[in-house]
Amino acid sequence: LAIHASVNDRPAVYTWEPNSNSGKPLFVLNEKGVAFDYHYIDLIEFEQHSPDYLRLNPLGTVPAFIHGSKSLTESTPLCEYIDAAFPGPSLTFPDAAGRYEMRRWCRLADRAAESVSVIGWHLHLGPMVRAKPREEIERLVARIPTRERRISWLAAVDGGFSDDQLDQARQAIGAFVSRMDAVLAQRAWLAGDRFSLADIVTFTNFYALPMSSPEFASEEVAPHVLEWLRRIYARPATMRTFSLARGLARRAFEIRDMLGAPREVRP
Amino acid sequence: LAIHASVNDRPAVYTWEPNSNSGKPLFVLNEKGVAFDYHYIDLIEFEQHSPDYLRLNPLGTVPAFIHGSKSLTESTPLCEYIDAAFPGPSLTFPDAAGRYEMRRWCRLADRAAESVSVIGWHLHLGPMVRAKPREEIERLVARIPTRERRISWLAAVDGGFSDDQLDQARQAIGAFVSRMDAVLAQRAWLAGDRFSLADIVTFTNFYALPMSSPEFASEEVAPHVLEWLRRIYARPATMRTFSLARGLARRAFEIRDMLGAPREVRP
């Protein structure tokens, strides 16, 4: 992993897959048509804790967005930064009430995403990390900056989540999806009459819903959410972003086909 | 509790004390010099679960901000709404980088505030609620809209938090205060060279630090945080806001004196 200074105004994104927080800047940049350098940080290899990466973001989280001399790491405020600082179609609302609604949905989605990541760890990340030899896991965990986070990583690798925690996470996802469906029965996009950062922040956390939580993604319980997913999968910027995936988020091509969304971009 | 429709452009705020989320719109409105109607929702009496209030905000959380036909309830996005929709001094930054930094701090403060509310429940709210007769507690809890939240309220009333949970909350507060102190050693305000929503959102959660977590609020460990608190306590809008307090937040007058901040507004 070599860290490059960003040249002129061209931003550099250090992040993992187009998935969850990691995906936010990738979807926003592609929607706006902004050229950028993409540096893949492999969470399965714990590259977010490598000394090089910690120089960009001492917190060891993804994404890190480098623009001129700045390193921006808080993913949802970063979406608003990219939307305001670069040319391309606006992804926000012109009025204060629309922006409030957009930010409210971003907060709701980010909160619900904590439950998605519990299920995601249980189904995907946990097993991928556990498949490594024990010595390698211990070597990777040893370089995590703080003792507190070394302990919680080891606990996640070894123990995972209890049935109670998994049940609570599933309930929270179900409640959020119903809330989305009620709103999307009234309007095409989450925050109003236009596609906005609210849709991107929610989509990057929920694009895999039909695969990882099919019980909440049926035509019976969430028809408007399914329509909304189809509309976003049909956007050229969406599939251009998923084309950057090397691992987990490749599943997006399969999910698009499950949903019957149009196929403009191939894997 | 009678709910009044808001007349013309004059907003109405239904909220508890100038404290935590409940205080956010009050501080922002007073900083901007916007006239508003204030309706006190007593959390100790569980008024946020009354049928009248649930019509304004079905979630049963405070604040609810009524402007024209809209009810806005997500407190940090609400601060940006008030700043943009009303006249008065701007509480944000003119540039995208400044606004990113402001929103980043708002997120950090809101996350750290979860730990403040654990300690706040333990020291203040829990004992106040537990002082009520048991039948009254059960009557108040019975009208909470969802079973899940009835259970967690009863658990909070009966059990409170474990020593482990309290320790973790104290550690998180300490870590956040060190982070603030490091930034405030470099600049007067949290997000840059001007007082902004970042300072308000953080202050409403941390104004009582010298009283509730004195170990983190000494001249030795957090001198710049103490100076920042003094500067905010010295703002006329701050003490005008605390004058609205009827219960818990009256402590602000005592804390201001502990800090040796100037006394422009009397309790």
Image: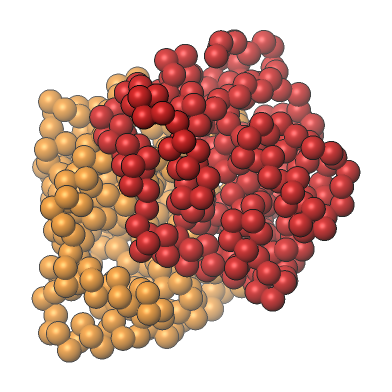
Chain colours: A orange, B red
Q: How far across and how far down the image is residue A126, in percent?
A: 17, 67
**Viewed as shown, does residue B203 lie left or right of B139?**
right
B59 up-or-down from B213: above or below:
above
Residue A142 placement: quadrant:
bottom left
**Viewed as shown, does residue B32 lie left or right of A40?**
right
A246 up-or-down from A136: above or below:
above
The residue located at (14%, 74%) in the rendering is A130
B103 up-or-down from B142: above or below:
below
Residue A69 placement: quadrant:
bottom right
Q: How far across and how far down the image is residue B40, in percent?
A: 61, 24
Q: Is residue A101 visible?
A: no
Q: Quadrant of the N terminus of chain A?
A: bottom left
Q: Viewer-proximal residue, B155 or A145?
A: B155
Q: How far across and how far down the image is residue B257, in percent?
A: 79, 53
Q: How far across and how far down the image is residue A64, in percent?
A: 46, 67
Q: Viewer-proximal residue, A180 or B204?
A: B204
The residue located at (55%, 40%) in the rendering is B21
Residue B58 placement: quadrant:
top left
The residue located at (68%, 34%) in the rendering is B245
The residue located at (43%, 84%) in the rendering is A52
Q: Is residue A3 visible?
A: yes
Tally of numbered discs: 0
Q: Quadrant of the C terminus of chain A?
A: bottom left
B83 up-or-down from B173: above or below:
above
